[in-house]
Image (tube, rainbow, N blue to C red):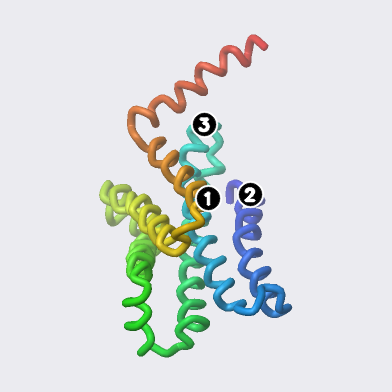
Amino acid sequence: MRYSFWRIGVFICAAVWPLLWLYQAWANVLGPDPGKVLVDRLGLGTLVLLLVTLSMTPLQKLTGWAGWIAVRRQLGLWCFAYVVLHLSGYTAFILGFDWSQLGVELRKRPYIIVGTLGFLCLLVLAATSNRYSQRRLGGRWKKLHRLAYLILGLGLLHMLWIVRADLKEWVAYASIGALLLILRIPAVARRIPRLMAKKTPSARKA
């Protein structure tokens, strides 16, 4: 397998954070409500991994290194794993497995609906991330996986609804997301390799 060490490194980096957070919860260093902290961190981890996944194609175009694309699917699946853990933590620590509370939560916190829509879209992408789905869907596969940008918008809205007043961190993530969207614009995307091509002759002269 190409880039095996790189793939293993990405796997370890993605896996270590939930394990670390679980250890911190077990060691009672997450404060008086460790369950809520775990849910929040897993939700933020989902957003961060989504942004990292979406940055792989621009990075490949900028550097010409195919290793970025080699781990894109793995990162996308880790993103889905994080959101599953996020929802599982919410069900266990916030609802306490009491499904009768869900209706109350939805009325009090409608951002849960936005998060659920994002989860369902991620579920579709995870289920169709395999090569069999690529072959079956053909050209429609790429169109379907553009849902990632809708998921990004839903994730940012979900986070905005939660943080409300303290927007500094949200603005940072939203700015990165906006930049990634701009880089997807065909006119901009076409210029990325041209910029690198212009640097090459000067680099040779040096």
> Is label 1 in a helix, a strand or a loop?
helix
Mark 2: amino acid: Trp
Lower sequence index among marks 3 and 1: 3
- What residue is disc 3 on? 62
Viewer-closest of 25 and 32: 32
Residue 55 in view of the camera: yes
Which residue is depicted at the point 33% across and 32% down? 186
Mark 3–mark 1 distance (CA, rounded to whole Å): 28 Å
User: Badge 2: few (under 14), some or many (20 or more) residues near its Cα, within 10 Å?
Assistant: some
x and y percentages locating residue 3 in the rendered image: 61, 47
Viewer-closest of 144 and 109: 109
Viewer-closest of 81 and 39: 39
- What residue is disc 1 on? 168
Mark 1: amino acid: Lys
Which residue is depicted at the point 35% across and 83% down? 104
Lower sequence index among marks 2 and 1: 2
Mark 2–mark 1 distance (CA, rounded to whole Å): 32 Å
> Is label 3 in a helix, a strand or a loop?
helix
x and y percentages locating residue 171 in the rendered image: 48, 48
Residue at the right extreme of this rendering: 27
> Is label 2 in a helix, a strand or a loop?
helix
Q: Residue 2 vs residue 131: left or right?
A: right
- What residue is disc 2 on? 6
